[in-house]
Image (spheres, rainbow, N blue to C red):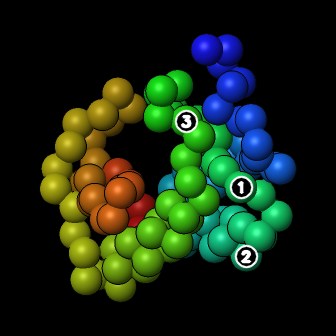
Amino acid sequence: MHRCEYLRGCRAAVLSGDNAAVPGSRPAFYANVRRLQEVADRFDVLLPAHAELPALPYPKDLIAELVEGIALILDGTLVGQPEKTAIGEGLRCEFGSTGVTYRSDRL
């Protein structure tokens, strides 16, 4: 299958890349994800950075899961489990079919 075959039938896709991630500022990350949610009626799927090709495209429903999950992290209801990543250590939270890794000192 050609790499772009998974876009067949999509009227529009968002190539979100890392644009929602603002180093050192999770409230800004949350605001950017909420902005994506506000315009979700304009696209069908997400093509984020760091995704494995077989998993693409992601359904835009993930945005609502991210908004809800990040809100729980920001209000202290949800706390992640320690995780080591390629760029350092963080706390990993899973919610719904997605999740985030964050640093508590940057909330």
Q: Which quarter shows the C terminus? A: bottom left
- Alpha-carbon span between mark 2 and mark 1: 13 Å
Counting residues from the N terminus, which is met first, the one under dot 2 or under dot 1? 2
Q: Residue at x 66, y 51 (%)?
A: 45
Q: Quadrant of residue 103?
A: bottom left
Residue that extends furthest to the left in the rendered view of this protein: 81
Q: Any mark on residue 44, and which?
A: 1
- Alpha-carbon span between mark 3 and mark 2: 22 Å
Q: Secondary structure at mark 3?
A: loop
Q: Residue at x 31, y 65 (%)?
A: 95
Q: Are marks 3 and 2 in contact (CB under 8 Å)?
A: no
Mark 3: amino acid = Leu
Q: Any mark on residue 17, and which?
A: none
Q: Which residue is mark 2?
A: 38
Q: Is residue 67 left or right of residue 75?
A: right
Q: Say if residue 57 shows up in the picture.
A: yes
Counting residues from the N terminus, which is met first, the one under dot 3 or under dot 1? 1
Residue 47 in the image: above or below residue 61: above
Seen from the viewer's position, the closer of residues 45 and 17 is 45
Q: Position of residue 20 (x, y in %)?
A: 63, 54
Q: Quadrant of residue 8?
A: top right
Q: Position of residue 87 (x, y in %)?
A: 38, 32
Q: Residues within 10 Å of mark 1 (few under 14, many from 20)?
A: some
Q: Position of residue 69 (x, y in %)?
A: 38, 72
Q: Which residue is mark 3?
A: 56
Residue 82 in the image: above or below residue 50: below
Q: Secondary structure at mark 2?
A: helix
Q: Are marks 3 and 1 in contact (CB under 8 Å)?
A: no
Mark 2: amino acid = Glu
Q: Are marks 2 and 1 in contact (CB under 8 Å)?
A: no
